[in-house]
């Protein structure tokens, strides 16, 4: 029996990359705002601030999407593991016992 997670890694990786890009843009906009604040008029400052807030909102949205995707992936993995353990309890018990013996042997050598 093979265990497969339902959520594709591409979705999580894509969300992560989009989040990184959004955060880079937010930082870049913040740096531009700080560099131009001394000579900026009130209208230019308001426009820059609005642009920065929009980018920050986009980054927050992407972070929420990434969090949801990771949570869903973890939930699928937990469900698959639980299903495997319930279908093969003796196999899991044997693997756990073997791991315990190996760890015990390694610890007793020290």
Image (tube, rainbow, N blue to C red):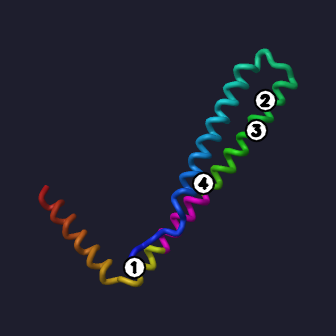
Q: Secondary structure at mark 4?
A: helix
User: Which residue has dot 4 on it?
Assistant: 66
Q: Residue furthest left?
A: 109
Q: Residue at x 61, y 45 (%)?
A: 19
The secondary element bearing badge 1 is classed as helix
- In magenta segment, residue 72: yes
On residue 53, the disc is 3
Indicate left or right for 84 with 52 as reference.
Answer: left
Please tell me which of labels 2 and 4 falls first in the chain: 2
Q: Position of residue 72 (x, y in %)?
A: 57, 65
C-alpha distance separating marks 1 and 4: 29 Å
SS at mark 2? helix
Q: Which mark sits nearer the N-terminus, 1 or 4? A: 4
Query: Of label 3 and label 1, which has the lower sequence position?
Result: 3
- x 69%, y 50%: residue: 61
Give the number of the disc on residue 48.
Answer: 2
Q: CA distance from mark 3 to mark 1?
A: 48 Å
* Span shown in magenta: 68-79
In the shown orientation, is residue 95 left or right of residue 19? left
Query: Which of pointers 4 and 3 lies earlier in the amino acid sequence?
Result: 3
Label 2 to label 4: alpha-carbon separation: 27 Å
Crowdedness near tag 3: few (<14), some (14–19) or many (≥20) residues, C-alpha within 10 Å: some
Please give the residue where the numbered disc 1 appears in the rendered image: 85
Mark whose residue sits in front, 1 or 4: 4
Report, in whole angstroms, how far the alpha carbon at label 1 lies from the one at label 2. 55 Å
Q: Tell me whether circle 4 and circle 3 mark residues in contact (CB < 8 Å).
A: no
Label 3 SS: helix
């Amino acid at each position: 029996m093979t265990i497969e997670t339902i959520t594709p890694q591409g979705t999580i990786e894509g969300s992560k990359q989009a989040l990184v890009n959004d955060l880079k843009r937010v930082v870049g906009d913040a740096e531009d705002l700080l560099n131009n604040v001394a000579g900026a008029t009130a209208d230019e400052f308001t426009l820059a601030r609005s642009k920065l807030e929009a980018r920050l909102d986009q980054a927050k949205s992407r972070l929420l999407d990434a969090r949801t995707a990771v949570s869903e992936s973890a939930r699928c993995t937990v469900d698959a593991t639980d299903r495997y353990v319930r279908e093969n309890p003796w196999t899991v018990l044997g693997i756990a016992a073997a791991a315990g013996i190996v760890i015990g042997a390694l610890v007793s050598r020290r």
